[in-house]
Image (spheres, rainbow, N blue to C red):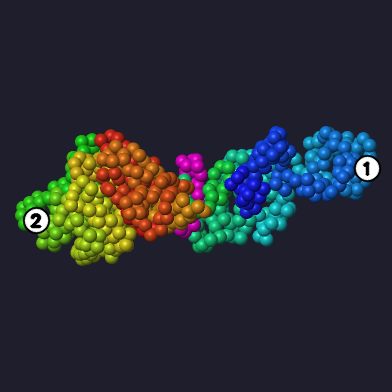
Amino acid sequence: MNKYKVGADTVKVDEIERLTETETGIKILSKLIYTELYSFSGKELVSAEWVMGVLDSIIGNAPSDLNTLEEIALAINNDPDFAATIVNSISTKVDKIVGKQLSTEDFTTSLLNKLNSISAGATANASDAQLRDRSTHSGTQLAATISDFNPSVDERISAKRDVANQLAPLDLNRKVPIENLPIAEIQAGSPQGIVLLGYNPGIPTTLITVIAGQTGVYSHLLDNTSTPLTADLELGVTYFTFNPVDGYWRKVVISVDVSAYLNQRGWFINSEPDNFYISDVDGNVVFEVTPAGVKYVGQVTQDQASVLNDIFDLNPEGLFVCDIDGNVAFKITSEGVKYIGQNENPDSITPVELGEYEYDYNHIIVYGQSLSVSGTFITPIDFYDTKTFSGGILTNYDPDNSAQRDAYYGSVLIPIPTSGTETQGKAISKIIKELIRDENKIEIANQNYTMIASAPGTAGASWDQLSNPTGDEYRRLIESVKKGKDFAIAEGKTYNVPILCYLQGENSNEKDDTITEFYNKLDTLFTNLNQDIKSITGQSKDVQFIVYQIASFSLNPPATVNPPLAQLKISIDKPNVHFGCAMYQMEYMDAVHGTSNTYRIMGAMMGVVAKRIMVDEKKMQPVIPKSWTIQKNEASTVWVINMKMNVPVMPLVFDTSVNSLYTTIPTNYGFSIKNGSTEIITNVNISRGDTLVIMCNQNPVGLELTYAINGRSSGGNLRDSQGEKVKISCEGVNMRVDNWCPIFKQVI
């Protein structure tokens, strides 16, 4: 304490004031005071610590704004009777009763009055007697909740059946029976009268009598002896046809003079558009219907009077009505006529004038390197009436040796051997014949033209050899055309070269060409061959070239993917060049050569294309993209490419059975889009049979979509379904002949 003093009775004021500035200082000061007082009085005093402890216990954890008496007084509004005030306020509130709390504070007096107005004993499920009429309520009630409602309605309906101008009875199928048809009303439906046609079975005699007795009704009905109808139908007449299978009449309007062929069946088509065709389930056109009449363009049997009956029996799925573009509008079956919209495969339903051909002999030439001249089969198969030269299908003589040349050609054409050496020309000619038989219903014996097949190429030949007019291969090709024409003329027949298949590029000096370089070589060769052949035959139509697509480049360096892409490009660009087949899915015996089965299947694929060219007069496009749209999710984490493909025969299929042929199993079935080195495709699937759905985890716009870009190494799995119907035998085993998607690149 002395250090705070100036003298015995005087303290240092500034030191004392400093102690009062902090809580610790106050405690020190109180202890000093206690000590000083104790020393002065000699008696013990209350300690500062005790005082502070008492104060702390009083304040406790009270907030800073309620830790003084003044602050507490202000909080209770300085009300000395605060407790009584609170009690009085609570006494004015409603007592809380469990289950009667209000969820909101909007219950009004008007609502209370409305509730009070409800009569005692009111219920939502009143009895039938208590139900009020519509004028007194606005609600609804299910008929099923009303007793006796349905029986009462049924009773009233039954009472009106068979009553004049009331209700007609229904048969077991809930249809109005024929005898209850309102004949007078039907008659009024056509200004020129009604024609009722059909079979006698199921038609009541009374109805026949009634119809025949109606004025203005022109009746063509079968009598009890089932005598067929012979009279032609009249123009502008409304027709009713009877189907004996279900026993019902159907109304059909005919606006053209339909021949007696259609009268045989009891159903008709609306043929108001200029050109409609009637075809069977396989797409074989039977009749062309135009304003000029009905023209027979197909053949099922030689007895044209029973054509429709035969088709209907052979194809239980029914007949189809299609327009001039091959778009199917209706399907006709025993169940009636069904609208089915546009056909997914217009190429399969195309009107073809058969029976008249421009040329008697059609020479199919397969030209190229080893793939055009290889293959051997032991098991014979029928190549029908296809012919070749005396020395066989391989035109491999020395053109500078006249003795060899004469020995090879001989003096007449001979039937092509049914086994032994194989080239694509054999299978091409076979498939053409069989497709005309199956699609156009002309038996092979009645197909009044003949195929000639020959192969003047050489194994390992380069483009330079094959394109050189003075080279052995080119000279043999030209000589075979001259000889073929001479043999035809000697028989008094006409001759042309409609198809030339070019199979070259697997192993030659241009396998590393750019796309443009290889494309231009093909274009030059095809132009020269077309000119040279036409100058010999005198044919007006261009020679049609069919190309395949190289796939061995990935196993045959320094080959690249460019030549196969050039082959695809020229087949799309040029009207007289066509895509024959892809090769990555084929069986190979080494890096570049296929097996015998491969060569025959190649020929079958090209045979389908050749038939479309020669007979159907169509350019058959391969399985390639036609159009596409792109969508993405809101988070921009998923992009979807919907790519509509050209599909010769629906539907598209991912065929993984070929994966065993690849060095590496294809990812995403052979499809790829890369951003740099990163693959962005996450999934690929098929929708609606002709659309690819390609899922990406990045924006694909501006990037390149590729398919089977590694050729034979990992290939792809996409094909159509042509092989369901088109097959060819390989050593006794029927092999599918599908159209496989070619190797391609496409910028999205």
Compared across the picture, whether 294 is left or right of 83 comes to left
Which sits earlier in the primary sequence, circle 1 or circle 2? Answer: 1
Query: Tag on residue 116?
Result: 1
Tag 1: residue type?
A: Asn
Q: Position of residue 174 (x, y in %)?
A: 69, 39
Depth check, mark 1 against mark 2: the one in front is: 1
Furthest residue in direction front, as rendered: 8
Query: Tag on residue 440?
Result: none
Q: CA distance from mark 1 to mark 2?
A: 119 Å
Query: Tag on residue 399?
Result: 2
Read off the magenta span. 303-327
The one nearer the camera, 118 or 669, is: 118
Residue at 5% across, 52% down: 403
Judging from the image, what secondary structure is the residue with disc 2 in? loop
The one nearer the camera, 2 or 149, is: 2
Judging from the image, what secondary structure is the residue with disc 1 in? helix
The verdict on residue 317 being magenta is yes
Q: Position of residue 260 (x, y in %)?
A: 53, 52
CA neighbours of label 2 inside 10 A, class few (<14), some (14 to 19), many (20+): some
